[in-house]
Amino acid sequence: MQSLAQRTLIALLGLTTLTATAQTASPSATKTTAGNPVFPGWYADPEGIVFNKQYWIYPTYSAPYNQQVFMDAFSSPDLVTWTKHPRIVDTTSIKWAKRAMWAPSITEKGGKYYLFFGANDIQNDQERGGIGVAVADKPEGPFRDYLGKPLIDKFHNGAQPIDQFVFHDKDGQYYLIYGGWRHCNIAKLKPDFTGFLPFPDGKTFHEITPEGYVEGPFMFIRNGKYYFMWSEGGWTGPDYSVAYAVADSPFGPFKRVGKILQQDPTVARGAGHHSVIQVPSGSTDDWYIVYHRRPLTETDGNHRETCIDRMEFAADGSIKPVKITKEGVSRRPIR
C-alpha cells in the first residue's frame, strides 16, 4: 500500500510515469473501503459506468488547457481496486482537437464503444472545436476519431458545446444532453451516432435548462421518473455543487428540487461535476455518485481528484444529501 507521501508525490508529478499498458492504481487486496480519492492524480468530471461486470470511470485529465490533450480510464471489479488504462484517446488520433479535451461520456452499442468528448473550449461559432465522438472495440480503447470532425461545432440556444452526456432512454432512443454557459440542450441522436434527428417540431436542439444550471448535466431513470442533475457555481470555487430536478420525460419541464452534493469544509471543497452508477446486480437499489472535489490543502483550480460516495433516496423518491467522505465506499463486486 502506498504511503500518503508517495501518493502525494505521484499526484504532484502528474503521473508522468505513464506507460502504454494498464496499471493497477490501488493494488492492495486487503483494503475494505476505496478511500477518496479512489485513484491518484488530478482528475475531474468523471463519468462512471458498468461494462462487462466491471466498474469504469472516464475522467478529464485535470491540468492547464494546453496540457489536456489525452484521456485516461480506470476500471475496477469491486470499487476498491482500480486499474489505470492510460491514454485511451489523445489529440494524435483526434486531429481537429488541440487542447481542452473534457468531460467524456461513453456508451456501448452493437459491440462498439462510443466516447463523446468536448475539445478546444470554443468561445464562438468561428472557432474550430466542440463536441466530438471517438469509437473503439473495447472499453479501454484505443479510441479513434469516428467522424473526422466535431459532432456539434456551433452554439445552439446559447449553450457552449461542452459537457456532453449520452442518455439511453427506456424506449431505446439515445439522446445527447449537453451545454455550458448556463444553457442545456437535448438532441436526438441518429442510430449510428453520426448526427441528429429533428424533433416533430422540426427543431434539432431543445433547451431544457432548469433554474441554477451551469454545466455538467447527467440523467437517469428510477421508478419511472427522470432525474436530471447538473453542476452549479464556479468550477474553481468552493461553491461548486450538484443539484437536481425530477420529471416524467427527458424533456421536462424540470423544476429544481435542491442541492444534494457540495463541499464539506472539514473534508474537501468544490464537490461537483458528477455521474451516477446503479449497481446492476439483479434489481438492486444501490447507487453511487462519482464526482470530483478539491483537497483542502490545494489552491490550484486544476488540482481536482475523483471520489465515490453512496447516494441514497428517501421514501418519497427524493435524493438525500450526499455525505462526502475520506473513507469512500465499501467493496462491492458485481454479481
Image (cartoon, rainbow, N blue to C red):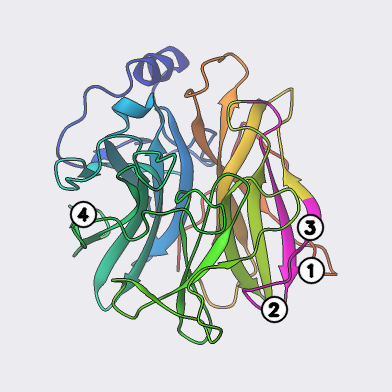
Q: Earlier in the sequence, mark 3 or mark 1?
A: 3
Q: Which residue is mark 4?
A: 141
Is 256 contained in the magenta span?
yes
Please, what secondary structure does the residue beneath circle 3 have?
Answer: strand
Please, what secondary structure does the residue beneath circle 2 have?
Answer: loop
The residue located at (34%, 36%) in the rendering is 27
- Numbered range of the magenta stretch: 237-258
Q: Is residue 291 visible?
A: yes
Q: Which residue is mark 1?
A: 317
- Amino acid type of the residue that numbered disc 2 sits on in the rendered structure: Asn
- Amino acid type of the residue that numbered disc 3 sits on in the rendered structure: Arg
State how far apart marks 3 and 2 are (Cα).
19 Å
Camera-side residue: 219 or 66?
66
- Amino acid type of the residue that numbered disc 4 sits on in the rendered structure: Gly
Q: Which residue is mark 3?
A: 256
Q: Earlier in the sequence, mark 1 or mark 4?
A: 4
Question: Which percent across, then down, holds residue 304?
Answer: 50, 28
